Image (cartoon, helix red, strand yellow):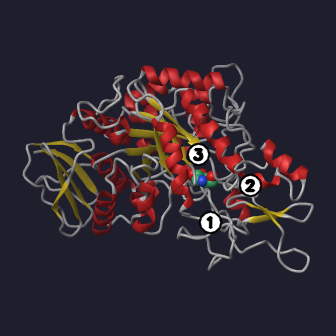
């Protein structure tokens, strides 16, 4: 594709740049710490942009860096148009956009429209103004049930455990689908919609190429707030998820995105919705032509490592829209890392699958290093509100958010800079003792490392005429085989079964996730890219 140049369409195809982009997800708090306080920051990211350029990504998506009490890692926003001092400044953000651009890398920011932080000034004003006020109308406040209103207004569950309602001192309750520190906005109030239009424009005006839309299946709530059929949290359409009103909202956002000039860098703006769905019928409406340009497909996140299941998921996704509008992912900051879900060999093979499928692919930081989930974080160090709210029943997502190892040794494995005199504070989440083995430094020295494989895959993906947004066709649908062709001249093959797999006729193995057998067949949990 067209990365590393200034063109706004994929080379010669007439498709928008995002149609086959490889996007790298940065969790700023855990990426690189430039000031030694143990928390990653925007300067740290800017200093490491050459690393992302050498990896070969087209864009970066930054999870929230806005002012926030960090009750939910920044998804509790107290100011949508600024940078938390712990992460840097707006000037520092602009420097990232400018430096990234020099590398041909676009920047996508996170938009969190379902809820804010209970520290947001508008929520504080709502609390102060009391029941019945216009200020409360910005949020979803209700009287409780029962004789003294002591029971929540309905039975909706919080995603992080417990009820989705919290009572305030005057007796009313407010809705929060996540932590009590994350009150839900009332999207039936036009002031909320107007405020978010301004926020979207604020970031687009600063040069961002797109938005990742948090909980894009939430946002509108059933006006009657009727009880759900179950208190078990679920992603089936309900009073709180997949409301049809979101479609009209996304049409208005699409119009804003399309109002920005597409013929200069960063090109047509995108927005990619985070939509968790139960069935393809639930996902389909989000892919309406005038809706958000893109919506994640989480098929490879939820899939077992099983060829038939993965084949079916790929077919279903491609028939819905293609991977361009529904980008592929194998992990993110909310799920157990692929190496731990499937095993290291399978995760390497899955990476080659991810990058060979038609359309766009997202890589979560550390995936390219083959980082495992950290399973033994001490309880006292855990930060995820889900851990706290369920009293440890849900271990939470800290294990995939441990700060990255850049160097083989030293304090914090190079995550925090140590050349500022003082020794750095401990990283905000503890790194395991063996973390240096997965460091960028160590992996660059090892030709067989995860990192080297990702670098080669991304280079080949840019160079090979068959890779990008075009079609694919299955060649072998037997047993544990995943074998498909892309034209011209490319075949992907993976073996998920115990018995070795004979490779189809080919000119050359251009990339392998692991060693082949002596007779050239493919061992279990191994994938290859073939020139045919
Ligand atoms: C999805 C985000 O990815 C996750 O980290 C967050 O906790 C919830 N949305 C709530 O914002």
Q: Residue at x 38, y 39 (%)?
A: 18
- Quadrant containing the C terminus is top left
Q: Nearer the viewer, mark 2 or mark 1?
A: 1
**Residue at the disc numbered 1:** 240
**Crowding near the residue tagged with mark 1, few <14, some 14–19, many ≥20 C-alpha atoms within 10 Å:** many
Quadrant for residue 196, please give it.
top right
Q: Nearer the viewer, mark 3 or mark 1?
A: 1
Quarter residue 66 falls in? top right
Residue at numbered disc 3: 402
User: Above or below — where is 161 with respect to 198?
Assistant: below
Q: Position of residue 386 (x, y in %)?
A: 67, 60
Q: Which is nearer the eye, 395 or 169?
A: 169
Which residue is under mark 2? 183
Q: Compared with residue 58, is residue 316 higher up or lower down, i.e. above or below?
A: below
> Could you tell which of marks 3 and 1 lies nearer the N-terminus?
1
Does 396 sit left or right of 122 as displayed? Answer: left
- Marks 2 and 1 in Cβ contact (< 8 Å): no
**Sequence order check, earlier mark of 3 and 2:** 2
Look at the numbered disc 3 and give the secondary structure of its residue.
loop
- Name the residue rendered at 19%, 37% in the picture: 465
Q: Percent x, y for residue 261?
A: 44, 28
**Residue 49 locus on image (x, y percent):** 48, 26
């Amino acid at each position: 594709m067209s990365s590393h140049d200034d063109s706004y369409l994929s080379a010669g195809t007439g498709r928008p740049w995002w149609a086959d982009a490889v996007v790298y997800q940065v969790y700023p708090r855990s990426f690189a710490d430039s000031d030694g306080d143990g928390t990653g920051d925007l300067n740290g990211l800017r200093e490491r942009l050459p690393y992302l350029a050498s990896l070969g990504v087209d864009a970066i998506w930054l999870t929230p860096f806005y002012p926030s009490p960090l009750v939910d890692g920044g998804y509790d926003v107290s100011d949508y148009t600024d940078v938390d001092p712990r992460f840097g400044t707006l000037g520092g953000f602009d420097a990232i956009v400018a430096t990234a651009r020099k590398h041909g890398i676009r920047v996508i920011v996170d938009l969190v429209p379902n809820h804010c932080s209970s520290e947001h000034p508008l929520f504080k004003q709502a609390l102060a103004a009391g029941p019945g006020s216009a200020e409360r109308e910005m949020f979803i406040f209700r009287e409780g049930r029962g004789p003294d209103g002591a029971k929540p207004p309905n039975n909706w569950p919080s995603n992080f455990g417990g009820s989705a309602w919290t009572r305030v001192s005057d007796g009313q309750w407010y809705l929060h689908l996540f932590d009590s520190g994350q009150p839900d906005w009332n999207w039936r109030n036009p002031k909320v919609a107007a405020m978010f239009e301004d926020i979207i424009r604020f970031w687009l005006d600063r040069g961002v190429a797109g938005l990742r839309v948090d909980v894009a299946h939430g946002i509108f709530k059933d006006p009657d707030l009727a009880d759900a059929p179950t208190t078990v949290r679920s992603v089936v359409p309900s009073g709180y998820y997949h409301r049809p009103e979101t479609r009209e909202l996304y049409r208005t956002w699409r119009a804003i995105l399309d109002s920005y000039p597409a013929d200069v860098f960063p090109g047509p703006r995108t927005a990619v919705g985070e939509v968790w769905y139960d069935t393809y019928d639930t996902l389909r409406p989000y892919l309406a032509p005038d809706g958000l340009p893109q919506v994640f497909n989480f098929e490879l996140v939820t899939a077992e490592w099983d060829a038939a299941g993965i084949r079916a998921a790929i077919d279903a996704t491609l028939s819905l829209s293609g991977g361009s509008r529904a980008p592929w992912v194998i992990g993110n900051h909310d799920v157990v890392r692929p190496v731990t879900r499937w095993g290291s060999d399978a995760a390497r093979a899955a990476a080659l699958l991810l990058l060979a499928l038609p359309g766009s692919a997202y890589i979560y930081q550390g995936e390219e290093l083959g980082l495992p989930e950290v399973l033994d974080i001490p309880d006292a160090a855990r930060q995820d509100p889900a851990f706290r709210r369920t009293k440890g029943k849900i271990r939470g997502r800290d294990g995939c958010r441990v700060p990255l190892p850049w160097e083989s040794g030293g304090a914090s494995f190079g995550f925090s800079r140590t050349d500022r005199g003082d020794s750095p504070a401990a990283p905000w989440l503890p790194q395991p003792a063996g973390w240096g083995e997965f460091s960028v430094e160590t992996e660059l020295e090892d030709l067989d490392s995860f990192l080297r494989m990702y670098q080669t895959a991304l280079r080949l993906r840019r160079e090979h005429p068959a890779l990008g947004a075009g079609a694919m066709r299955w060649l072998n649908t037997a047993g544990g085989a995943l074998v498909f062709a892309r034209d011209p001249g490319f075949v992907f093959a993976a073996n998920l079964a115990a018995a070795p797999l004979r490779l189809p006729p080919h000119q050359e193995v251009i990339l392998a996730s692991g060693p082949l057998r002596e007779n050239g067949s493919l061992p279990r949990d191994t994938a290859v890219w073939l020139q045919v």
